[in-house]
């Protein structure tokens, strides 16, 4: 895992039952541009989230807050790339289109979510 820097995008997207936080709700533990107020003691849901950037599977220039999307692959669906779009303009950007093209060439299915809606 790498340091997330100022990125707090997962704090907006994830469902965190331990904090009674639903999908696409702002986390009460999030400090904007700084992360979790209790990073060491953060809930299990947060610790186990598989952000591809944090796992060093994406270049540093594609940090989720800069890219406008968080990408993840869950262990129970290893051929499915889940894209949580956090910025409305993200679909117009070349970096995301190129990244999705690379995953599709490797036969990944892609599932896209955006502010609570899902698109396949």
Image (tube, helix red, strand yellow):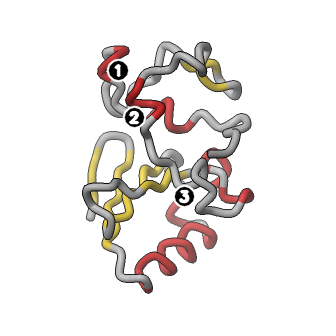
Marks 3 and 2, the one that precedes in the sequence: 2
Q: Secondary structure at mark 3?
A: helix
114 sits left or right of 95 in the view? left
Residue lying at 43% horizontally and 21% vertically, measured from the top left: 43
Q: Position of residue 21 (x, y in %)?
A: 35, 20
Q: Secondary structure at mark 2?
A: loop
Q: Position of residue 7 (x, y in %)?
A: 65, 38
Residue lying at 71% horizontally and 34% vertically, measured from the top left: 6
40 sits left or right of 34 in the view? left
User: Which quadrant of the rendered structure holds the N terminus?
Assistant: top right
Q: Position of residue 74 (x, y in %)?
A: 34, 54
Contact (CB < 8 A) between labels 1 and 2? Answer: yes
The image quadrant that residue 94 belongs to is: bottom right
Name the residue that disc number 1 marks. 21
Marks 3 and 1, the one that precedes in the sequence: 1
Mark 3 or 1: in front is 1
Name the residue that disc number 3 marks. 90
Badge 2: residue crowd in 10 Å (few <14, some 14–19, many ≥20): some
- Seen in the picture, residue 95 relative to 116 is either above or below; the reply is below
Name the residue that disc number 2 marks. 14
């Amino acid at each position: 895992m790498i340091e997330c820097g100022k990125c707090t995008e997962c704090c907006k997207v994830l469902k965190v039952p331990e904090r009674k936080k639903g999908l696409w709700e702002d986390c009460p533990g999030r400090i904007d541009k700084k992360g979790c107020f209790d990073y060491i003691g953060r809930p299990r849901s947060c610790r186990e989230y598989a952000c591809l950037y944090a796992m060093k599977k994406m270049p540093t220039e594609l940090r989720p807050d800069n890219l406008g999307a968080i990408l993840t692959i869950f262990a129970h669906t290893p051929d499915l790339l889940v894209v949580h779009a956090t910025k409305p303009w993200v679909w117009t950007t070349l970096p995301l289109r190129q990244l999705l093209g690379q995953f599709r060439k490797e036969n990944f299915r892609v599932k896209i979510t955006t502010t609570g809606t899902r698109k396949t």
